[in-house]
Image (tube, grey):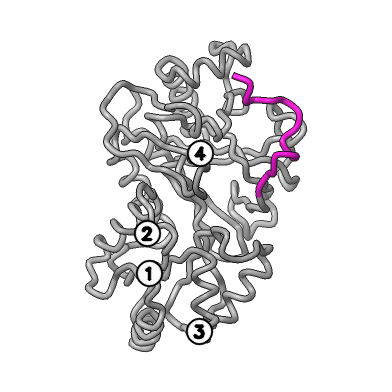
Amino acid sequence: MITATDIFTISSQKQFEKIALKVFRFQYENNLVYKEFCDFLKTDVQRVKSIQQIPFLPIQFFKSHNVVSNTNPIQTTFSSSGTTGMITSKHLVTDVTLYEESYRKGFAEFYGNIENYVVLALLPSYLEREGSSLIYMVEDLIQLSNHPESGFYLHNHDDLIKKLIELDESGQNVILIGVTYALLDLIEKQKFHLQNTIIMETGGMKGKRKEMIREELHEQLRNGFGVSAIHSEYGMTELLSQAYSLGEGVFECPSWMQILIRDTEDALTYIPQGKTGGINVIDLANINSCSFIATQDLGKKYPQQPACLPAGSFEVLGRFDNSDIRGCNLMVI
């Protein structure tokens, strides 16, 4: 039996691979959707000896199937955003404490003690719907910050502008977590010169603005907030863990999460570091759903050189559109 302690105390690549292979066998035996998928690919479970041999479930299955690895009651269901009539992803969570432990430990790994920060959140499109895993996480971080100034902002930009300037000038460490388009709206109203504030964008124009390449977006945000770097969070409804970028769009994972880059022409093969392909995520916190997910994001993994970049760091370069998904059609079943 794999426990939360096994997952959240991983300290080496060898240990990660050992637990990942255990999780794979557990999910093959207990997740009917994942078993059917692996059987469709004619996977010989006994011959899977490395994480590169593990089948990755296409993320679209979270839209069409109940992806669960046990028969315990569903404690909460996280759902993705979508326009009216669109089929959204749903992540059925049977143990929400795994999610809480994952994002709390993940945040601490990159930012230290949450009580050192005032946490401000500008997430209008998430707040205005039910089932957002991001809102669940940020709401908890706000509570854990134990600071009366922490909180959510919806469309009250003037209040947020005043609060940001006031806190920053007082020397208080602040994290402003915002959906991309709302952060751009904010700096159109006010140009800042922040000294003690981290700006963390969670991605997404949500149909409010035209999409921008990261370099252009981050340049606008850096100039608008007067900061030297824009931080980013890489997470999604289907994952219980997040990767973080402390600047330049270079993401790092907590120790229980890793990514692999698959060939866009053949979803069952991997490409060398430094080349662009599809992002596959291993999230061991997903023990009760599926820990091996083939996303629709494009990215590249950095080699261990230059030495200034940590091993396993990666960049997100965009998303597949339907015309990009060629080669092995993993959505047949």
In the image, residue 85 sits, relative to residue 104, either above or below, namely: above
The amino acid at mark 4 is Ile
- Residue at the extreme front: 85
Magenta part of the protein: which range? 319-333
Label 3 crowd bin: few (<14), some (14–19), many (20+), radius 10 Å: few
**Secondary structure state at the residue bearing disc 1:** loop
> Disc 4 marks which residue?
87
Badge 2, how many Cα within 10 Å: few under 14, some, many 20+? some
The residue that label 2 is drawn on is 127
The dominant secondary structure in magenta is: loop
Q: Amino acid at mark 3?
A: Lys
217 in relation to 95, above or below: below
Identify the mark nearer the N-term, 2 or 4.
4
| Structural distance between the alpha carbons of marks 1 and 4 | 26 Å
From the top left corner, tell me how far across and down residue 40 is, in percent. Answer: 60, 14
Q: Mark 2 and mark 1: span between their CA atoms?
A: 8 Å
Proximity of marks 3 and 2: CB atoms separated by less than 8 Å: no
Which kind of residue does numbered mark 2 sit on? Leu
The residue indicated by pointer 3 is 189
* Residue 324 occupies quadrant: top right
Q: CA distance from mark 3 to mark 2?
A: 21 Å
Residue depicted at x 68% and y 70%: 216
In the picture, the disc for residue 154 is 1
Left or right: residue 127 compared with residue 184: left
